[in-house]
Image: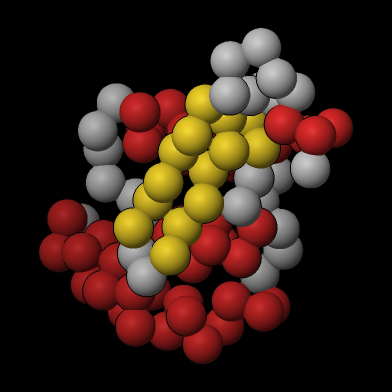
Amino acid sequence: MRSLQRRLALLEAVIAPARIPEYPLLTTAEINDIAERYQSGQRLTKLELCRLERQSPIIEGELLMTCHDGNVFAKRYVGIDVATAL
């Protein structure tokens, strides 16, 4: 089973960037999951990075997550509602 999961992950990493326009925007639940895993130091999948780069979500009004060339940047604006400031 692990071998199959690993192969699917590799296939997803190769195919995902070409199919990104077909993927819907990240949902609130997906954004929160990505933010929690990023903040705990876990790796994000290639697909998540591509979708994150496309959307640059704002989490809980204070945390702005952006992605460029596979690098994730998170900036917290304490006390500022970024969603209304942009």
Q: Quadrant of the rendered structure where residue 60 is?
A: top right
Residue 49 appears left or right of 44: right
Q: Looking at the figure, which quarter contains the N terminus?
A: bottom left
Furthest toward the right, the residue is 84
Give the x, y percent position of residue 66: 51, 51
Count the labels in the image. Answer: 0
Q: Quadrant of the rendered structure where residue 30 is?
A: top right
Q: Residue at x 80, y 34 (%)?
A: 85
Q: Looking at the figure, which quarter contains the C terminus?
A: top right
Give the x, y percent position of residue 20: 59, 76
Q: Does 34 appear above or below 17?
A: above
- For residue 35, say whether it is visible: yes
Furthest toward the top, the residue is 79
Q: Residue at x 35, y 28 (%)?
A: 39
- For residue 29, say whether it is visible: no
Residue 45 appears left or right of 31: left
- The residue lying toward the viewer, choosing from 61 and 8, is 61
Q: Residue at x 17, y 55 (%)?
A: 2
